[in-house]
Amino acid sequence: MEPEAEITALLREVSEGHAPALEQLYERVYAELRIRAEAILPRASHTLQPTALVHESYLRVAQSSGLALEDRGHFFAVSARAMRQILVDHARAKQRLKRGGDAKRMPLEDSLRIDDAPIDLLELDDALDALAREDERLARVVELRFFAGLSVEETADVMGLGTATVKRDWRVARMWLLDALKD
């Protein structure tokens, strides 16, 4: 069976409630998820290791009841959401430990660049939630591009949109987030 067909078959089994299929699915896509986690963590200024992030995301997804994965893109979107939640939870715990002490804030224009600048995940998470209340699609584009590390083309494929639409949404979302975070 070809790798893509095997993944599709595993997704179908997961949706049908076959628990071992999720573990097999993660084994098949582990390397890809780890690469995406490696890309996220330096920008997120996090102490988590990529392996730990992928394993924690697996546990979170595995604990979800009634998980119905439509396709490969949907699986990566669910994984991106789990990674986002894990990173934000860790940032919140770290901030609680510091009691708000020396938590560094960085403007979004610096933090959404693909470089080594750290990101204030709590501020970004709050802004993304606010953006989702206004435009769910824009928030999902940011989540897929930033937290899952998907390219414009991959994001377009996952969301069933054209690449021009994703590029435009990415620009609009960044501008919206910049404006929201200035306050």
Image: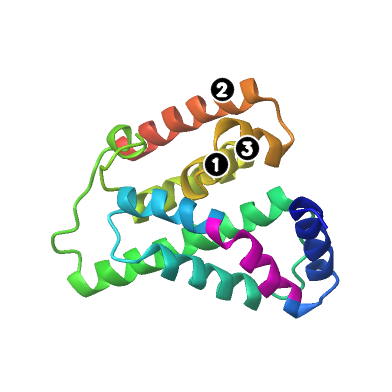
Crowding around mark 2 (Cα neighbors within 10 Å: few <14, some 14 to 19, many 20+) is few
Residue 110 placed where, x, y %?
Answer: 28, 35
Labels 2 and 1: the sequence-earlier one: 1
Q: Residue 7, relative to residue 56: is it above or below?
A: above
Residue 56 placed where, x, y %?
Answer: 49, 72
Labels 2 and 3: the sequence-earlier one: 3
In front of the other: 52 or 77:
52
Are the residues flagged by discs 1 and 3 in contact, CB closer than 8 Å?
Answer: yes
Stretch in magenta: 21-31
Q: Residue at x 63, y 58 (%)?
A: 78
The residue that disc 3 covers is 154
Q: CA distance from mark 1 to mark 3?
A: 6 Å
Q: Secondary structure at mark 1?
A: loop
**Quarter residue 61 falls in:** bottom right
Q: CA distance from mark 2 to mark 3?
A: 15 Å
Question: Which image quarter holds the N terminus?
Answer: bottom right
Residue 120 visible, this angle:
no
**Quarter residue 51 falls in:** bottom left
40 relative position to 33: left or right: left
97 relative position to 158: left or right: left
Q: Residue furthest front?
A: 1
57 relative position to 38: left or right: right
Q: Could you tell me the amino acid type at mark 2? A: Arg
Most common SS among magenta residues:
helix
Q: Is residue 170 magenta?
A: no
Q: Is residue 23 magenta?
A: yes
> Which numbered tag is attached to residue 168?
2
In front of the other: 122 or 1:
1
Residue 152 visible, this angle:
yes
The residue that disc 1 covers is 150
181 relative position to 3: left or right: left
Residue 152 placed where, x, y %?
Answer: 57, 31
